[in-house]
Amino acid sequence: MPWNAFVKEVAQMSKTKVGIINVTGYAGVELARLLSQHPEVELTSVTGRSTAGKKLGEVFPHLASIDLTIKAELGEVSLAFSAMPHRESAKEVIPLVSRNIKVVDISADFRLKDASEYLSWYGSTHPAPQLLKQAVYGLPELYRHQVTSAQLVANPGCYPTGAILALAPAVKAGIITPEIIIDSKTGVSGAGRTLNLLTHFAEANEDVTAYALDGHRHLPEIIQELTLLSPQQSPAITFVPHLIPMTRGILTTGYAPLAPGKVSINKKGKDELLQLYRDFYQGEPFISIVGVPPHTKYTWGSNTCFIHPTIDLRTGRLIVVSCIDNLIKGAAGQAIQNMNLMLGLPETTGLGASAIYP
Amino acid sequence: MPWNAFVKEVAQMSKTKVGIINVTGYAGVELARLLSQHPEVELTSVTGRSTAGKKLGEVFPHLASIDLTIKAELGEVSLAFSAMPHRESAKEVIPLVSRNIKVVDISADFRLKDASEYLSWYGSTHPAPQLLKQAVYGLPELYRHQVTSAQLVANPGCYPTGAILALAPAVKAGIITPEIIIDSKTGVSGAGRTLNLLTHFAEANEDVTAYALDGHRHLPEIIQELTLLSPQQSPAITFVPHLIPMTRGILTTGYAPLAPGKVSINKKGKDELLQLYRDFYQGEPFISIVGVPPHTKYTWGSNTCFIHPTIDLRTGRLIVVSCIDNLIKGAAGQAIQNMNLMLGLPETTGLGASAIYP
Amino acid sequence: MPWNAFVKEVAQMSKTKVGIINVTGYAGVELARLLSQHPEVELTSVTGRSTAGKKLGEVFPHLASIDLTIKAELGEVSLAFSAMPHRESAKEVIPLVSRNIKVVDISADFRLKDASEYLSWYGSTHPAPQLLKQAVYGLPELYRHQVTSAQLVANPGCYPTGAILALAPAVKAGIITPEIIIDSKTGVSGAGRTLNLLTHFAEANEDVTAYALDGHRHLPEIIQELTLLSPQQSPAITFVPHLIPMTRGILTTGYAPLAPGKVSINKKGKDELLQLYRDFYQGEPFISIVGVPPHTKYTWGSNTCFIHPTIDLRTGRLIVVSCIDNLIKGAAGQAIQNMNLMLGLPETTGLGASAIYP
Amino acid sequence: MPWNAFVKEVAQMSKTKVGIINVTGYAGVELARLLSQHPEVELTSVTGRSTAGKKLGEVFPHLASIDLTIKAELGEVSLAFSAMPHRESAKEVIPLVSRNIKVVDISADFRLKDASEYLSWYGSTHPAPQLLKQAVYGLPELYRHQVTSAQLVANPGCYPTGAILALAPAVKAGIITPEIIIDSKTGVSGAGRTLNLLTHFAEANEDVTAYALDGHRHLPEIIQELTLLSPQQSPAITFVPHLIPMTRGILTTGYAPLAPGKVSINKKGKDELLQLYRDFYQGEPFISIVGVPPHTKYTWGSNTCFIHPTIDLRTGRLIVVSCIDNLIKGAAGQAIQNMNLMLGLPETTGLGASAIYP
């Protein structure tokens, strides 16, 4: 064996082995792409149901360079990502946790701390309530310390990621009263790869619609986290998601009244607000506070969340706009950010890609 | 001359002659299309600046069947549409009004009743403050009677049309307190035909952004009209427009707290709310109150505004969603609706087209 | 009864009753829209399978003004459109024909004159070979006379409509040798309303692909018709369709060598070619021969086919580009054009709409 | 200085310094993104005209992590990319070459070997005909050896890259007769960042058009290269580009008659053809020969060219489809591939990213 190949093989051997349960959805395939380029872990096992037995490159020709066969069962790994639908995901996760395998769960199963909330929003009793306490809500900007030592991380939903990051500084600082409106606009990939008339091209193209006006399943997540940031006053949150004709990206616009006397309602107050956000996210590698309204295009393929807080001077309201790539910071990228922390790697490892523009 | 041709010619002679000032923008060309198919008026004159001297079908090959040459000056007409930019429009309108020619002004010049508001939002003194009093705000659902006898109608902006129609019933009935958030999502044609990096395909495609967070010029229009509907309590309105990657359509989502004791915060209250909206718009030919969230696709090419009012039961807030085609009900269609009223024609004449789907 | 209502009722009574079998696909719903605005026929019956029992406006809110309930079975009509899938369509058509009801079949069942071709391309024996002889291929620009007296019209496929209209003048005039390449680009609605990963928004958006390289089912139709136009030399046609990320429209680019000595390979020859096309389509209400490359946008919502023939002076080849709206001239509009002829109405009745731009 | 920082600094010092002339176009900004992530070179200088003096991150917020100020003049570098428009590019390149700085020219200035062709297609005499001989056409799959020792590389056009790679194996092997049709479909970013009505969102969205039917400037490049591959028979090439509503990607469909007796016109022949292509591109890191028609989506953000060759069995024609990302393999990625060769680096350095899907 030549020296180079030997060095490479040793390096490969020392890498942490990771796997993906249900690689064939959009979050799964994005995990596969990002992990295959990650310098410190090795993707060694991917599972799928209808595609079991096929090479990954048969199903996704652009990933032909990843030499893996999709299996029905996960192989031996030190850390697993579950990209299964909710409820089914918990069933996969339980045995892994009991075998001391670290897990990042992309599904909603371990996000809500209160099993009765799970019942009410997901229509079935929680499959593993005993794990809820140990599961960490995987928003590193709020729970970095806990994620670092976690065995089970619940990766946040795409909407909650954008909404919580946008509002956390204001809620935490108590500069707003808790009458919060969250209006989100998502690209269609957020609805997944399962066929649906709503996401049929001829229906979704050249169209915009609001949906889930009776309550979207991501709402309790947002309420839970914003309440934890401001336990003294529970927020009254209205959240309306909208489907817009693009593939990737979520732009979230948040509105709330500024609390009296906290921020000046003038140009200077706007600057103070910007500074408050910059201070809150000081040193965060994946948060960019900007002085002008951001575009989701700034995030295409990147793990960065852009946030622009400002004041509506006429009404004394906070307006805050955030942009993320729903499949990266809103799913696979954040999951790898969590993995990095769980494995003691630098948080940005494998996540340095800038957005691809235009 | 054969009898048929004679009958046709007489019919044509009896039609009202109408013209379009600045036919080459998106509102202008849409007016030309709709007027050419209108059974009771005849489009006899169209103007344009850089294109003067060309046949309409040279500039817009799909309109080759309209046999008109674009001129620098308007010919003799009984009613004119001005699709000039603001300020320039007023200059065109003044002499027409003094010659007793009826005018529907698509620009913003005569929408604001208060010339000082015009100065503050458009940055120049109003070119014809003497006409502001007689100009009628051309939202027929609110001002039908006044439009009927008007000589000068100020056609509403595209955002205000969707926003005011969505909120008018609730404001008028006093069922909300006036802390109103209006979050609008527009197709790119709303930004017009003038070239701009923001509307360059590679920039606008696969992107969404918020803009005009310091105040969009359509805001004072919305404030003016909602205040007139509820003079006792002036509304505090935050309006944020968003640009989304589609050609046509505006979806507006409005949010406001329900006033205590006015509507039940339950399923029954939702039905009452729906009924309140249906009663308010009883008999309106271009308003469709629907029980589920509408799609802008329902309005593609039609003059209908779809409105869905509902209650966020968790927070006791009104959520109301409206959809229009920004170039029809939001511009050219509404202008013709106004023209029909001004000429004593049935309001729906020439505006019967259903949306084209998908 | 007031006089007006009486006159209207009499007019309505005298209208021909027509129906649509399978209204819920894209061709069916477009037929419903166009027929509801047609002044000389009355749409009285629409059928659907999974939606039977619902009001048309429940399934398609933008068509709420058409007061019809979707039924499982067709009611009494004088003329029926079948928008069923192939094979199933023939089964619906056979009994109608035997009851002397006129039929326009949107499916492929009666387009191919040779039942063995049907077997070879559609994989099953033809359900009604006895009807093939009487069925007329419903391209009015080629078969107007036959359509006028037909009881059963086979509405052409969307690709064949654009391709045959583009090439017919050149083939008929014998100015090309029959080595024909046809490269078509279609909007996604051409693939219908049935869910499919290929037409899932996140897959089809920001993508283009070629498909059916082994032979698309529309190819035998194109071969049949171009051969009939030039029986002495059977054409060798390669046809490759491409799926592009837009909802409506087909652009077809045809290539063929110019036959020696027929057309000058210079600027003058280009003009002669344009004139040859203009002469061929002289008086055709739905054909527009243009001197510059057309856009599918010129056809959005209209029944017009734009055609631009030119010469590649470097190679002496014909290049011809055609644009249609795949759901109008490529389906529902052409079906109504055929209906008009079959009922003795002016061919353009109800089809006068210009394209909606932008 | 801590040890880590020292090591990093030394590593940085040893990197080759490179610069970009005119960073603000789409090719330039894509070069900046890719070079900033390249492990073996350091981007130290970027120029721009109207944006000189601004930080790169001000103009392109997603590139804020690249800490560079746009300058009017290029700084000291060992290798420069010129992304200037043609003619202006040559003027920038001449002095660099005379100072022995290596150059990859993204413009068209040094692609055509024959200065009279340049005059005929670009309408002006060539600014530096003396450099044409030494300039290497930078398609590494054909000219790897020459690129390796080149001082000046002419980066191929986007269309020629897709078209030449698709046809080269067939032309070189002599299996086709040279009557070649090339029908390309490009995303709108290919038209650049300069504003133009054709690329205005509302015009380009939901539209497809053919353009440059009299001859596109990329045609002589294609002719030159395919002729060099088969000098004994000069090809007669018709090339028609089409603009389709997506941001990135080019799909090219090539057609040519198979030469008699070279390939069997049957299933076996198809396999032989596939093998011929696989052999031709044996070991090429950025070519993927596939057995089914590829999607441009497979290439989004990657430097790979997917090629699918097949036979139209009915007519005995070659059909070959290629897909590239027009801004990567069609511009910036290929430029870096050339740079890697010129600097003696492994060819794939910094170009390992898989496509981002969906």
Image (cartoon, coloured by chain):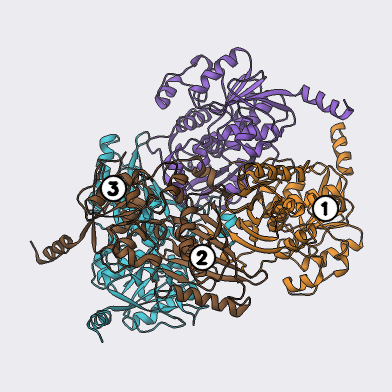
Chain colours: A orange, B brown, C cyan, D purple
Say if labels 1 and 3 share a chain. no
| Location of residue C100 in the rendering, given as x and y in whole percent from the top left corner | 31, 81
Residue C49 showing in the rendered view? yes
Q: Marks 1 and 2: in contact by CB < 8 Å?
A: no
Point out which mark residue C206 bears: none
User: For numbered disc 1, what is the local secondary structure?
Assistant: helix
Q: Chain of mark 3?
A: B
Q: Chain of mark 1?
A: A
Which amino acid type is marked by label 3?
Ile
N-terminal of the pair, mark 2 or mark 3, is 3
* Mark 2 and mark 1: Cα distance apart in space: 48 Å
Q: From the viewer's perspective, is residue D26 above or below residue A256? A: above
- The residue that label 2 is drawn on is B232
| Location of residue C28 in the rendering, given as x and y in whole percent from the top left corner | 43, 70
- Residue A31 appears left or right of D146: right
Crowding at mark 3 (Cα within 10 Å: few <14, some 14-19, many 20+): some
- The residue that label 1 is drawn on is A143
* Mark 2 and mark 3: Cα distance apart in space: 34 Å
User: For numbered disc 3, what is the local secondary structure?
Assistant: helix
Residue C108 showing in the rendered view? no
> Which mark is in front, 2 or 1?
2
| Location of residue A88 in the rendering, given as x and y in whole percent from the top left corner | 77, 68
- What is the residue that sits farthest to the front in this orientation? B232
- The residue that label 3 is drawn on is B94
Q: Marks 3 and 2: in contact by CB < 8 Å?
A: no
Which amino acid type is marked by label 1?
Tyr
Crowding at mark 1 (Cα within 10 Å: few <14, some 14-19, many 20+): few
